[in-house]
Image (tube, helix red, strand yellow):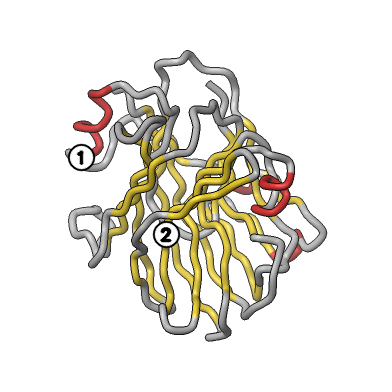
Amino acid sequence: MKILIFILFSISLCFGQIMLDPDRTSFWDGGAPSGCTSEDIDTDYTKAGAQASAVTLYDDSLGYASVSRTTDAYVYKSHVEHSATFTYCFDFIIHSSDDGGDYVRLNLFGVATDSGTTDQIQGANDNLATVSYRHHWGDGQEIYLLDVYDGDDSYSASAITVSNSTTYYATFKDTLGGSYGMLKLYIYSDANRTTNINGSPITLNLGETVTYDVTQPWSSEDGGSGGSVTGRVENVKICDCTQ
C-alpha cells in the first residue's frame, strides 16, 4: 500500500487503508499505538507550490506563517509499497493562531493519491482524506474532517471547536463504517492522549475505496479569499496499526 502524508498542525493522527482489519479498531480505541516511527520532516518531506516559502521545515516539525485560502503551498512525502494488510496510523501535535479574519481554511494532515492543494487535487479527480481547520464568522475556530473524491467532496457532520494559540494532540485513523470505511479524529488536551476535548471524536464516511500514495502533513485550499493563520505541526509519528 502506498501512502502520501499531508501535515499541517501539530496533531496526533491515525489513518490507513480503507479495507480494514477489525483488530485495528480495538487497538486504537485502547489508546496510543506501539511500534511508531517519528518522522524527520526536514529530511523526508518536500514543500512545493508557488508560495512554498510560507512553510518552513524543521527536524521534527513544520511551521507556516500568514497563510490564507489563496496560498499555493503544500508539504508531502511519497511512501514505498506495502502489503494490503499493512495499515498506517498517525499521531501529531497542532498549534495555530489566526488573525481573526473570516473564512480561514487549510488542511492540517492528510493522505492522498497525489500531492497538491485541495483545489488541485479536486480538479484532477484525485483523492484526499484530511484533517482540516477553518474559522468562519459565527462558528469560531474549528477542526473537521474532509474527504475529496471524484471531483466532489464531503465534510464531517460535526466539527471540534478549538481555541487560538492553544496546543492540541491528535490521532487520525480509518475504521469500520459506511460502505467504504470511515475516518475518525480524536483531539486531546494532554500529551498522554487520555482526555478528549469537548466534541471529540468526530467521524466521516469515505466516498469510495482507494489506496492512498502520499502523506501530506500540511496543505492549503488554494482558492477563495479570507483571513490568514500562522501555526505549526509537530512530532509526527507513523504507526503500524496491524500490531
Given residues 158 and 240, the one toward you in this image is: 158
Name the secondary structure under disc 2.
strand
Quadrant of the drawing holding the C terminus: top left
- Relative vertical location of residue 196 with respect to residue 86 in this rendering, above or below: below
User: Is 15 placed left or right of 114 in the picture?
Assistant: left
Q: Can you name the residue that lies furthest to the right here? A: 50
Residue 79 coordinates in the image, percent (x, y): 59, 28
Q: Is 114 positioned to the left or the right of 178 in the image? A: right
Query: What x and y, as percent, mark residue 74?
Result: 68, 53
Q: Mark 2 points at which residue?
A: 144
Q: How many labels does the image show?
A: 2
User: Badge 1: how crowded within 10 Å, few (<14), some, or many (20+)?
Assistant: few
Identify the residue shown where x is 44% and y is 51%.
235
Q: Residue at left 76%, top 63%? A: 53
Q: Residue 29 carries which label?
A: 1
Circles 1 and 2 in contact, beta carbons < 8 Å: no
Amino acid type, residue under disc 2 in the picture = Tyr
Q: Which amino acid does label 1 sit on?
A: Asp
Whether residue 209 is situated above or below residue 117 in the rendered picture: above
Q: In front: 116, or 8? A: 116
Q: Element under label 1?
A: helix
